[in-house]
Image (cartoon, rainbow, N blue to C red):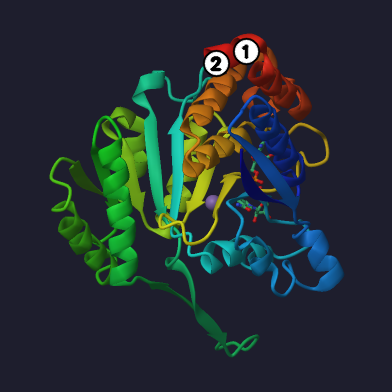
Amino acid sequence: MKTYEIATIPGDGIGKEVVPAGQQVLEALAKTSSTYRFNFENFDWGADYFREHGVMIPDGGLDKIRNKDAILFGSAGDPHIPDHITLWGLRLKICQGFDQYANVRPTRILPGIDGPLKRCGPDDLNWVIVRENSEGEYAGVGGRVHQGHPIEAATDVSMMTRAGVERIMRFAFKLAQSRPRKLLTVITKSNAQRHAMVMWDEIALQISKEFPDVTWDKELVDASTARMINRPASLDTIVATNLHADILSDLAAALAGSLGIAPTGNIDPEHRYPSMFEPIHGSAFDIMGKGLANPVGTFWSCVMMLDHLGETDDAQRLMRAIEQVTANRAMHTRDLGGIATTAQVTQAVCELLTAPRQRKAA
Ligand code: NAD
Ligand code: MN
């Protein structure tokens, strides 16, 4: 029997509600497996830890999770602490410390969920956005001078390296190649940003030659927002810089019905470090502590985690259970226009996973 060592880091706000829900679902899944089980270790890092200790993660914290098989993360962000402190102190520290350079965000309209696009059937929107997750606009390069004086100046420099762009392009082409349509759209802004984004385009062309069976095109990031809405079926796999993909993937999540159902994986494709899986939403201050958080984004992130661990059959089994639950409108949380609670949705998924019939079908 294989044991997967999983670090859970709920973080702040509704992260503390959806991560335990995700753990419950994974435990229900493992209960019916004869080949593997999970061993969870929880880490109370985040804003509360910061209030007590002045840091989001203790010294040497990363070493405690370095040898885990995967990380299940909630969200970082607190109404009383500046967002750049919580984000850089926790989530980015892990993403950058473990060189999780590919951020992968699948988007589909799940059964039973109404997307806001009128003429968009469920088969018209089936995307995976690949976000460069280690450099670019969020490289952290920059500074402030003359602070507080009238001549104050500040920079955030977008830093792109050939090695960094080559590896994300290769990852995106490979992912596009593995999907039925073998179709990749490279998002750019090389008309206005004439240095790094021009290199980005050149490298896309270079890497495309390694993947002759992948059809690909280029789209300016501003035009791509209109295309996502007007011609969603023309897109399949999408690769974009850290900032561009950050924005596009929130749009994608909204087009699929809610921020609350969208998952993501921060992946180290070389498996040198643990990869980290999390819902894309934040701490949701407006609903935290009320039991109203939609746990589906976390469950879908667990599906990505299982795939990454190589448990592809159980990944599919969990995805089917999630879809059966979203298809039932009585199990919709408030963000989807329903009245179900986090606990009810979690229980519904767990019951499907442990029901004798589903077990046999799997
Ligand atoms: P948010 O995602 O927290 O919330 C946006 C809106 O969506 C809110 O109305 C919220 O109630 C709703 N929502 C989000 N997730 C939901 C869910 N699972 N179920 C139901 N409704 C849901 O974004 P925000 O308000 O911009 O940010 C709040 C805090 O979270 C900030 O501190 C921000 O920095 C942080 N944040 C963290 C991450 C992360 O850790 N990955 C991502 C985004 C935002
Ligand atoms: Mn974001």
Going 67% across and 41% down the picture, which residue do you hit? 38
Residue 74 is left or right of residue 318, and the answer is right
Contact (CB < 8 A) between labels 2 and 1?
A: yes
Residue 353 location in percent, x, y? 64, 20
- Compare residues 298 and 241 and report the one nearer the observer: 298
Label 1 residue near ligand 1, CB within 8 Å: no
Q: Residues within 10 Å of mark 2 (few under 14, many from 20)?
A: some
**Which part of the image, by quadrant, shows the N terminus?**
top right
Question: What residue is drawn where x is 65% and y is 31%?
Answer: 30
Residue 113 location, x and y as percent?
54, 20
Which residue lies under the disc numbered 2? 112
Give the amino acid at mark 1.
Answer: Asn
In this orientation, which residue lies closer to the viewer: 229 or 288? Answer: 288
- How many labels sit on residues? 2
Q: Please determine whether, in this image, residue 157 is positioned above or below residue 287.
A: below
Amino acid type at mark 2: Gly
Q: Residue furthest right?
A: 52
- Whichever of labels 2 and 1 marks the residue nearer the N terminus, that label is 2
What distance separates the C-alpha of mark 2 from that of mark 1?
A: 6 Å
Q: Which mark is residue 328?
A: 1
